[in-house]
Image (cartoon, rainbow, N blue to C red):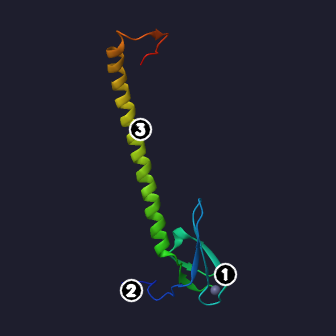
């Protein structure tokens, strides 16, 4: 009853991962009829069927899928960090500007709204 139906499916040991900005793909051959197949790397580790002979197998590329997922996560982290850095910088800048404008006003030559000595 609780048997995993995918446990006895053949795993494909020979495969090639093709990186792409829109999503990496994995190229491999059907373990039964050796048809050349291609799947999205995001489908790695999932059960799939050969369109030629109908054999079930596990899409290869699990380590690469993991590596790509980690890379994407790091990219998201970096983006989030950059945004919070930018917000902090902007807040600091706004605070500093209001302080420094007050400070330099005495000996500052104003042209329009711009201080040319600051
Ligand atoms: Zn096949």
Distance from Cα at disc 3 to Cα at disc 2: 52 Å
In the depicted view, which residue is nearer to us: 97 or 14? 97
Q: Quadrant of the N terminus?
A: bottom left
99 shown above or below 41: above
32 shown above or below 17: below
Q: Which residue is mark 1?
A: 36
In the depicted view, which residue is nearer to us: 12 or 55? 12
Q: Which residue is mark 2?
A: 3
Distance from Cα at disc 1 to Cα at disc 2: 30 Å
Q: Is mark 3 within 8 Å of ligand 1?
A: no
On the image, the x and y values in percent for residue 64 come to 49, 72
Q: Residues within 10 Å of mark 3 (few under 14, many from 20)?
A: few
On the image, the x and y values in percent for residue 98 come to 35, 20
Q: Nearer the viewer, mark 3 or mark 2?
A: 3
Ligand 1: image quarter = bottom right
Q: Which residue is mark 3?
A: 86
Q: Residues within 10 Å of mark 2 (few under 14, many from 20)?
A: few
Q: Earlier in the sequence, mark 3 or mark 2?
A: 2
On the image, the x and y values in percent for residue 7 come to 43, 86
87 shown above or below 106: below
Q: Quadrant of the C terminus?
A: top left
Q: Is residue 39 left or right of residue 44?
A: right
For the point 44% across and 53% down, the residue is 76
Q: Is mark 1 within 8 Å of ligand 1?
A: no
Distance from Cα at disc 3 to Cα at disc 1: 48 Å
Q: Earlier in the sequence, mark 3 or mark 1?
A: 1
């Amino acid at each position: 009853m609780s048997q995993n139906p995918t446990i006895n499916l053949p795993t494909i040991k020979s495969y090639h991962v093709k990186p792409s900005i829109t999503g990496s793909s994995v190229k491999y051959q059907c373990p039964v009829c050796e048809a050349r197949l291609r799947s999205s790397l995001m489908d790695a580790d999932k059960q799939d069927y050969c369109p030629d002979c109908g054999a079930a197998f596990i899409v290869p590329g699990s380590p690469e899928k993991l590596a790509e997922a980690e890379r994407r996560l790091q990219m998201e982290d970096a983006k989030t960090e950059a945004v919070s850095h930018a917000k902090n910088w902007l807040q600091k800048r706004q605070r500093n500007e209001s302080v420094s404008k007050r400070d330099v006003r005495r000996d500052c030559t104003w042209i329009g709204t711009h201080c040319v000595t600051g």
